Image (tube, helix red, strand yellow):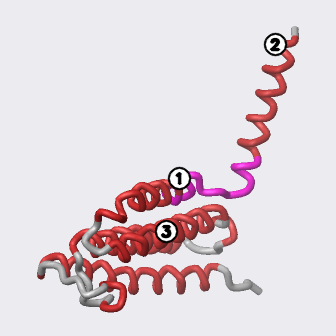
Amino acid sequence: MADSVVDDVAGAAVGAWRALEVSSGIDRAGVRRGFVLILLSLLGGVATPFLANPRMGVGAHTLGVLGGLVLIALAATAAAFRLSPELRRTMRRCWLAATYLNWSGTLLAGITGASFLTPIAGAGTTGSTAAEVAVIVAYVTVGITSVAGTLIAIVGLRDRA
């Protein structure tokens, strides 16, 4: 009898959680993508002492954790954005690209020593031409996609009369 009571309570709790999840508009896939980025940045942080430029490794670790938190925040507040499905998808893709490219581009800079755009954090290291170009493309893309994602978010949060 005690087992059936526990099963009933557990079933009710799971049902209530699912109902809350659906009614709250939380984007579970977005939350998961945020936690994956956090996990990748934590694992990358372990390799930091072995990189050509450990300072950039610490930067990648920090940017990955913060980027993951941004993705989780966007996913948790998905219902607050009043956007068309296309704009919502574009905003999500912009932030996904910005956060993952910021982390991976900075990690690549740490691995290769690329530092053309980050001479202070570069600590005097220089990467190959291919590595420098890859990091530059990543950082320029991060700038464009994060500004676009922010503008779309602002539009989606404006008051409607």
Where is mark 2, residue-wise? 3
Q: What element carries label 2?
A: helix
Amino acid carrying label 3: it is: Arg
Where is mark 1, residue-wise? 32
Q: Along the polypeptide, which appears first: circle 3 or circle 1?
A: 1
Whether label 2 touches label 3, CB < 8 Å:
no
Q: Which of 8 and 155 is in front in this view?
A: 8
Q: Is mark 1 on a helix, strand or loop?
A: helix
| Majority SS type along the magenta span | helix
| Residue at 58% in and 52% down | 28
Where is mark 3, residue-wise? 92
Q: In this view, does 25 lie above or below 8?
A: below
| Percent of width and height locating residue 132 | 19, 82
- Res 52 label: none
Amino acid carrying label 2: it is: Asp
- Stretch of the chain drawn in magenta: 20-34
| Residue at 74% in and 35% down | 14
Q: Along the polypeptide, which appears first: circle 2 or circle 3?
A: 2
| Percent of width and height locating residue 101 | 36, 71
Question: Gap between marks 2 and 1, in whole Å?
Answer: 32 Å
**Mark 2 closeness class: few <14, some 14–19, many ≥20 residues within 10 Å:** few
State yes or no: residue 134 in magenta.
no
Residue 93 appears in the rendering: no
Q: Which of 126 and 36 is in front in this view?
A: 126
